[in-house]
Image (cartoon, rainbow, N blue to C red):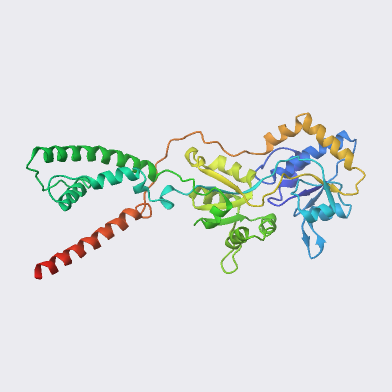
Amino acid sequence: MANVIQESNNTKDHMLKEDRLDLQHDADTKLCWIAATHAFEMLNATPRYIFSYRWGYLVDGRWTGMIADIVSNKADLATNCFLFADRLDVVTYTDVVAPIRTRFIFRQPPLTSVSNIFSLPFSTSVWVAISASQLDGSIADALLLTMSAVAQQGCFIEPRRAPGRIMEWVLFAALMALYAAYSANIVVLLQAPSNSIRSLAHLSESKMTLAALDVDYSRFLLNQHKDKIHLEITKRVISENDKPQFYSINDGTEKIRQGMFALHSLVGPIYRRIKDTFLESEKCDLTEIDYVNGFDAFIPVKKDSPYLEMIRVVFKQIRESGLQSALVKRFQVQKPRCSNTMSAFSSVGFLDLAPVLIFMLYGTALSIFILIAEIVYYKM
């Protein structure tokens, strides 16, 4: 069997000892090897192994990695790998041993980065009702009074008749309740994640930093598609001018935790690291998006191998007996569940308050314009 080692040289020792140590590196390779040793025992065959540094790609008309080992008869089967059209010319796929998924993994951006949260607490009808309240007197006085009540600035207008006084009392009482509700909603929204990125198109249009795990397969998988969206994402990861965005497991996972960062990788190693380092509240907005649109990975065997049918049968027996599911639970980590829906404390920066600051600048500019207009009107 050809085994792919890409993440740690220590994998060889741990794989042969089957000690389940250092599982953050090459866990799928270790899983496939143990399943293969069971298959060899069922076939009364002696297990032998070789190691490859990549899964196998067609480079300048020649196969590399474990696919080359199979084609050259150095190995009868190999580690799970994806189905690519060019591989089907030389190998046949048997069964799924280790479910493998590659995804962009990220935390949804905060709501403040995609929406104006200061307009979200109330519906349009409530905003219209607030601005349309009127008392006895001119519309300008009523508007000024309403704005003063909304801003909790008090008011210099004193209605002389009972209806106007009743409306003033109702207005200030209602806006006091609205202000309390509004403030409570803003506090929640400042810490709430959005759900704005749900597809590759959304990811390519986002302001997130896009990166990939610094391993061999990342360079090949990111260049498999030629449509506009995939090319845009690939360009942002493998930039021609800037430094390519490739990270180790530890650094990439920490970037995911900090936010506004999406890492493309096998999900197992990343989720294992997330499980060990993330707070419970930080696991609740994790999202994954498929980039390669790939099927499950299967065990490859040479196309004209005399052992093809025997290998197929024993792998099906391993799966039906429950051994495969037991190995998957031992070696692979699923997406962490959100067990704590309470929001943790998070600081608020200028970017979160940008809509309010811009609104204040507009208000200042408008007040200066009105001042100049009043001076001109007075002079005339």
Q: Position of residue 138 (x, y in %)?
A: 14, 51
Nearest the viewer among 380 and 277 is 380
Q: Residue furthest top?
A: 321
Nearest the viewer among 25 and 239 is 239
- What residue lies at 82% left-to-right and 62% top-to-bottom? 62
Q: Is residue 44 left or right of residue 149?
A: right
Q: Residue furthest left?
A: 160
Q: Is residue 104 left or right of residue 14?
A: left
Q: Position of residue 246 (x, y in %)?
A: 60, 58
Q: Is residue 259 left or right of residue 232?
A: left
Quarter holding the C terminus?
A: bottom left
Nearest the viewer among 367 and 301 is 367
Res 186 → quadrant: top left
Total numbered badges shown on the rendered structure: 0
- What residue lies at 55% left-to-right and 45% top-to-bottom? 287
Q: Residue furthest right?
A: 306
Q: Is residue 180 left or right of residue 345?
A: left
Nearest the viewer among 299 and 233 is 233
Q: Position of residue 96 (x, y in %)?
A: 76, 40
Q: Position of residue 308 (x, y in %)?
A: 88, 43
Rendered view: 203 above or below 163? below
